[in-house]
Image: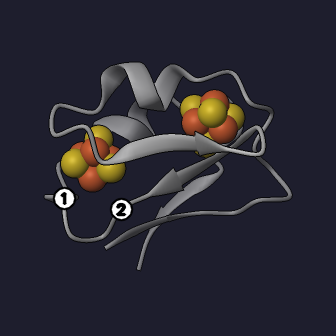
């Protein structure tokens, strides 16, 4: 699964735009990943400018 480190997210929304499964939404200006929709493709980690998204 992929998770967002809330302290490192700068609300750029790049990951939300890139996610092919629609698993990411913005909640209170922080990206949030729906684990049920995430397919661990890694696209979000590739586009995040701050490295806020990690695979666990
Ligand atoms: S790993 Fe892929 S499917 Fe999962 S949240 Fe990131 S872009 Fe979406
Ligand atoms: S790409 Fe990174 S910084 Fe931008 S909204 Fe997503 S988690 Fe936050």
Q: Residue at x 21, y 70 (%)?
A: 36
Residue 6, percent across and down?
Answer: 76, 59
Residue sitting at x 76%, y 37% = 29
Q: Is residue 33 left or right of residue 28?
A: left
Residue 56 rendering spot, x and y as whole percentages: 41, 80
For label 1, being within 8 Å of ligand 1 is answered yes
Q: CA distance from mark 1 to mark 2?
A: 6 Å
Say the numbered circle drawn on residue 16: none
Q: Are marks 1 and 2 in contact (CB under 8 Å)?
A: yes
Identify the residue position indicated by label 2 in the image. Answer: 34
- Give above or below for 37 relative to 35: above
Secondary structure state at the residue bearing disc 2:
loop
Quarter in which the N terminus is drawn: bottom left
Q: In the displayed orientation, state which residue is furthest to the bottom.
A: 56
The outermost residue toward the front is: 28
- Residue displayed at 43% across by 57% down: 33
Q: Is 16 in front, or is 5?
A: 16
For label 2, count other residues whose C-alpha is less than 10 Å away and answer few (under 14), some (14-19) or many (20+).
some
Residue found 80% across the figure and 50% down from its top: 8
**Looking at mark 2, is its residue's CB closer than 8 Å to ligand 1?**
yes
Viewer can see residue 42:
no
Would residue 22 appear left or right of 44 to someone viewing this image?
left
Quadrant location of residue 30? Answer: top right
Residue wearing tag 1:
37
Task: Residue 13: tell me if it is visible.
Answer: yes
What is the crowding at mark 1: few (fewer than 14 residues within 10 Å), some, or many (at least 20)? few
- When the figure is inspected, residue 34 is found, relative to residue 11, above or below; the finding is below
Number of marks in picture: 2
Question: Element type at marker 1?
Answer: loop
Left or right: 25 in relation to 12: left
Task: Residue 13 in the image: state x and y as whole percent.
Answer: 58, 23
**Residue 17, percent across and down?**
39, 19
């Amino acid at each position: 699964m992929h998770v967002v480190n809330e302290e490192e997210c700068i609300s750029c929304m790049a990951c939300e735009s890139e996610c092919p499964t629609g698993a990411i939404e913005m909640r209170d200006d922080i990206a949030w990943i729906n684990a049920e929709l995430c397919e661990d493709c890694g696209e979000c980690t590739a586009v995040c400018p701050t490295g806020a998204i990690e695979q666990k």
